[in-house]
Amino acid sequence: MEETKQDETTQEETTAAQEPVQPSPAAAEHAAAAEAAAAFAAQIAELEGALAEERARADKLLDQSQRMAADFQNSRRRLEGQVQDEIERASTHLVRRLLPVIDDFDLAFANTPADLAAGAAWVEGFRQIQKKLHNLLAEEGVQLIAQEGPFDPALHEAVSGEPSDTVPAGDIIGTLRAGYTYKGKVLRPALVRVAM
């Protein structure tokens, strides 16, 4: 009978080992909560990684847009400068073409016979035209180069050097052709005679 008791005990142990152990409800809740927390932590880590990628992408796009805006601004300034340079070049070209006309007026009035210069209305009309041309050029920034005083090689071109008792050496004796500057740059140097 002892054998039978042992068989029964062994059989009970085997049956007990084969029966699943039922976890307690608190342990089941704890395991489910731990599993949910792990899933939630994994989801947070995934979202943080995606957020970091999107921030890097946004930073890259912001940098590109700022560079494009700066390039556009620089391009616009460069274009405005080129347009201004073209306007200056066209104005300079026009003024240079008007200078011979001014010279012709100046020569005509310097050589007008006395009987015509005194009272002819048409001569006075041409003087007014000459005056308007000079005023128009002055308004645009054209200035007459000094025709007296010391010789300046940047502004004057010496045609001849002559001895003079009344003018100090190195000063201008007379002007053969007027010179002009336009906005600070020499358009045409004055042709002068210089005292030696």
Image (cartoon, rainbow, N blue to C red):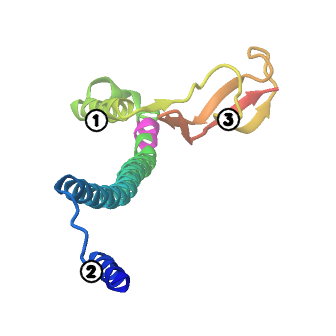
Q: Any magenta on residue 173?
A: no
| Residue assigned mark 2 | 15
Considering the numbered disc 3 on the image, is that residue within a helix, a strand or a loop? Answer: loop
Q: Which mark is residue 12?
A: none
Residue 12 to residue 191: above or below: below
Find the residue positioned furthest to the front.
1
- Magenta range is 103-108
Q: Return the x and y of residue 32 as percentages of the image width and height.
A: 22, 59
Assess disc 1: are there few (<14), some (14-19) or many (≥20) residues with their C-alpha within 10 Å of its C-alpha. some
**Could you tell me which quadrant the N terminus lies in?**
bottom left
Residue 60 to residue 115: above or below: below
CB contact under 8 Å: marks 1 and 2: no
Considering the numbered disc 2 on the image, is that residue within a helix, a strand or a loop? Answer: helix
Residue at the image position 80 percent from the left and 21 percent from the top:
169
| Residue assigned mark 3 | 154
Q: Which mark is residue 129?
A: 1
Along the line of sight, which residue is nearer the eye, 43 or 34? 34
Q: Return the x and y of residue 92 as percentages of the image width and height.
A: 44, 47
Mark 2 or mark 3: whose residue is earlier in sequence: 2
Q: Give, as a three-letter code, the residue at label 1.
A: Ile
Q: Return the x and y of residue 111 as percentages of the image width and height.
A: 46, 35
Viewer-nearest of labels 2 and 3?
Answer: 2
